[in-house]
Amino acid sequence: MPTPRRSPARPQRHPQPPRARRPDVRSSGRPPVRRRKPRWAMRMATTLSVVLLASAGIGHAVVTSLDEDIARVDPFRDMKNRPEAGHGMNVLLVGTDGRDKITESERRTYRLGGAPCHCTDTIMIVHISEDRERASVVSLPRDSYAETPEHTDETTGKRHGPHPLKLNAAYAEGGPNLTVRTVENMTHVKIDHYLEVDFTSFMKTVDVLGGVRVCTTQPLKDSYTGLDLAAGSHLLNGGQALQYVRSRHVDGASDLGRMQRQQRFLAALVEQTTSSGVLMNPMKFRDVTRAVLGSVRADKGFGTDELLDLGRAMRNFSPSSSEFTTVPIGQMGYVVKGIGSTLKWDGAKSRKLFTALRDDKPLAAPRPHRSEARRVDVSPQQIQVQVENGTGTAGLGKRVDSALASTGFRTTRRPTNAADRTARRTVVSYDPRWDRSAKSLAAALPGAELREVKGQGAVLKVTAGSDFEKVKRVRADDPYQGEFGATTGDQVVCP
């Protein structure tokens, strides 16, 4: 790594500016004015800080001292037959319900009573792109149906063969090691680093940042966590932020709704961190990082160099650089004997999602400029389309297919010719079960006729008529749409 070689040079540079200042004072013929020295020194210190931070993202000496604060675990012990490494860096971020350091007052105020379950409350894969310009966060529902590889139970010492469970229970049976192994088996994504955050670390981090601002269009109230927010914008302290990201009973979406709020909060956290000057202020960065690292556990390889890498990456980050999604769910309420109700992933969609992650590709669809796009109910990335040419004009089907695909619709890329080649008007044929998708597609084809066809299925059909002129751009009102349900951070933070 080039970073360690930089650190010896910094102390040598630091005293040079004061020596250059003295000749200027003597040549003026006036004695130095003492009351200005502190201001000059402060400006010089600020300048040096900026130079150092701009060259390394964050101060190497600051980060080296923080490395010692991290509690270490070995989540990759004795792991074999792991997935092949992709491009970029993958961090498994795990939030635990550790309550050992929570005060009695905090327990009562933020409804943190009860015994800890020794399981993972939050599980996310954070992918940092190879060029360090993008962060992709994929939430893995804690109630996901999972199958563990064979392992030894950390509590009982008993050897277990592969068996089904809820994903968050893997931590209780086999700690970080079994959690990583289970996630890798399910996603086929190689995990490079493991980071475990508990309640205490989370609250301290938010408080050191001075709070994090979130917005909601609807009131949020949860009697279980005590969350009670009116519609509007709110600056949350550490305890309130914990209530916000833990609440599962504010609507019918349960854990899936909670994960969306966690993603919104992370986007707001990125905005607060990158816009508040934390990454350009060594002391502020030290305070924030100590708040995080004082209560986290990480793998042995996650040290100074990795922190510097992340610091450099975040130096150029903004909410639009981050993207968030949840693994696609194929079946809600999938009941497993002895386990209960679970969430079963959509096999085809989740494979496609994790392939994109391994290949270091963006998950959120490119967004058209707001002024050019018409609002619709369903995102083009969720609409499957078969195009056929209803006219005698050669190549019209291909032209319509390409235009729809370029604006985000999932066309088959295999346009055909209609049996009747005398169509004057463009027609969208659809199964009534996909009527919202049909209306969204028709909005992109001005003047198109909607035609209901029972039993047609999920693929909509566009028969291009002689009236076809162009495809208009459309966008969904709900930012959590698209092929992977991904959204960029700038779509969900407060305006």
Image: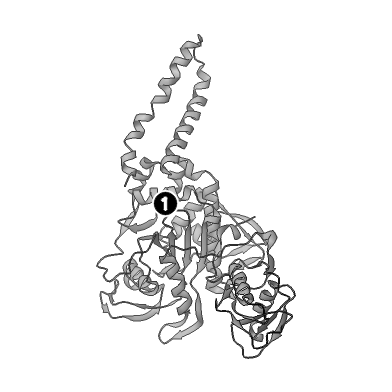
**Horizontal and vertical percent position of residue 112:** 49, 64
**Horizontal and vertical percent position of residue 199:** 45, 60
Is residue 21 visible in this depiction of the protein?
yes
Is residue 244 visible in this depiction of the protein?
no
Residue plotted at (69% across, 87% down): 452
The C terminus is located in which quarter? Answer: bottom right
Q: Looking at the image, which is closer to me, 290 or 58?
A: 58
Residue plotted at (51% across, 10% down): 30
Q: Residue furthest top?
A: 29
Q: Residue 444 vs residue 458: left or right?
A: right
Q: Looking at the image, which is closer to me, 337 or 312?
A: 312
**Horizontal and vertical percent position of residue 18:** 42, 23
Judged from the image, the secondary structure of the residue bearing numbered disc 1 is: helix
Q: Which residue is mark 1?
A: 310
| Image coloring type | one colour
* Quadrant of residue 392 within the rendered picture: bottom right
The amino acid pointed to by label 1 is Leu
Q: Is residue 215 above or below residue 259?
A: above
Q: Residue furthest bottom?
A: 455
Residue plotted at (47% across, 50% down): 314
Q: Looking at the image, which is closer to me, 229 or 27?
A: 27
* Quadrant of residue 264 within the rendered picture: bottom right
Count of numbered tags: 1
Neighbours of disc 1 within 10 Å: few (<14), some (14-19), many (20+): some
**Horizontal and vertical percent position of residue 419:** 64, 88
Q: Residue 173 vs residue 324: left or right?
A: left
Q: Is residue 442 above or below residue 309?
A: below
Q: Residue 46 vs residue 218: left or right?
A: left
Q: Is residue 76 above or below residue 233?
A: below
Q: Is residue 391 above or below residue 130?
A: below
